[in-house]
Image (cartoon, grey):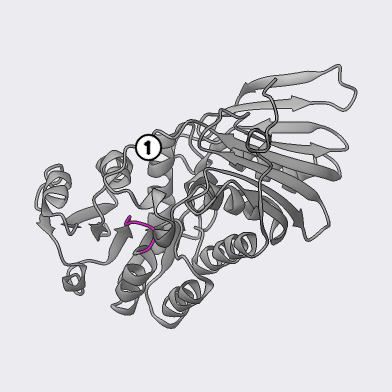
Amino acid sequence: MELPIRLAIVGCGTVAEGFHGPALRGFQGFAPVVMVDRQLHRAELLKSYFPSCVAETDFTTLCGRVDAAIVALPNDLNAMVATRLLQAGISVLVEKPAALTVESARELETAAVKGRAKLAVGFIRREALGVRMAKACLASGMLGDIRTFSVEDGYAFSWEGVSDFRFDGTRGGGILFDIGSHVLDMLTFWFGDIRIKRFADDSRGGVETNAHIVAETQAGISGTVELSWTRSLRNTARIVGTRGTLDVEWYRSGAHLALPNGLHTLSGEVTGDRRLRGGADVFPTMFLAQLRRWHAWLRDDTAAEARMADASDGRRNIELITSCHAMREQMAQPWRNGATAA
């Protein structure tokens, strides 16, 4: 029997405490041995859940002590730490965004390609049952020729982080690097390479809280993305084909299929297999499914359902975000121009 993979978590904030930690307690393939955070009390809190685990503040001491690490740091630190760990021969699962610039994403990719260690990027939505169902529907051709797509992802921001980096534009703050990164990866997961045709947001010197994207697939299929931290939106992805329209969710397992005649619809819950290799139904179990997939990937398990998002996926994601920034327009805000609210 193979020994568990020795693991460190670097960055013991909300996502590590609330999701990575519980997932590790539900899966025996990893042996957590070190928790690292520059705030020692954060590392101490997380390590209390794991026997034989120690809490430290310096990630540079991990070489030879662990085989892999989860890097869950503020956006501006992920690439630097992940690159250093890869260069030390430690495989990494890094939270998105893997980097803030194309240059740092390429450096990270180079470190992953040159060394023996593997880099996976935590695009957690790839584990959602609805997202995986949509990919299977597209691959099967059941929707016919795809005409367009749209994604709406919006809610009143409520993430209780231990750092304020999400509201600091110099540290990768704003909605585009946050949920926008997930949505752009979801689209490339489904359609392959895409390009940005238009981008607008509501930033007026600070971070953006609303954004609108027009994107196009290699096949010339155009679609839209609407993002908001201030409004409740539809919160589904809609794919329109000649044979049907599919709506799927990502943090729940709901799906809705409408046939082109408009008379027949099917709504229900997407189901998966017990080992979570076909996806997960809610946010916490998506981390468990990701952990199982990452373990299989590190073990070179040829029976693994699908590979993890890797360094090239992370780099393409940052290229798309960079393209958005390069063509940024100001979103229409009629209330600023004297219009009367209806």
Residue 75 counted in the magenta span: yes
Query: Outermost residue toward the bottom?
Result: 114
> What residue do we see at 50% from left, 64% from top?
310
The image quadrant that residue 143 belongs to is: top right
Left or right, 287 with reference to 45: right
| Amino acid on which disc 1 is placed | Trp
For this rendering, which residue is in front, 320 or 82? 320
Quarter of the picture containing the N terminus is bottom left
Point out the image quarter for the C terminus: top right
Residue highlighted by disc 1 = 159
Instruction: Give the secondary structure at mark 1.
Output: loop
Where residue 284 sits in the image (x, y, percent)? Answer: 38, 36
Chief secondary structure of the magenta span? loop
Q: Residue 319's spot in the image, x, y percent?
A: 59, 66
State whether residue 43 is above or below residue 276: below
Give the magenta range: 72-76
Q: Is residue 259 magenta?
A: no
Question: Residue visible at 20% across and 73% down?
Answer: 60
The residue shown at (29%, 61%) is 69
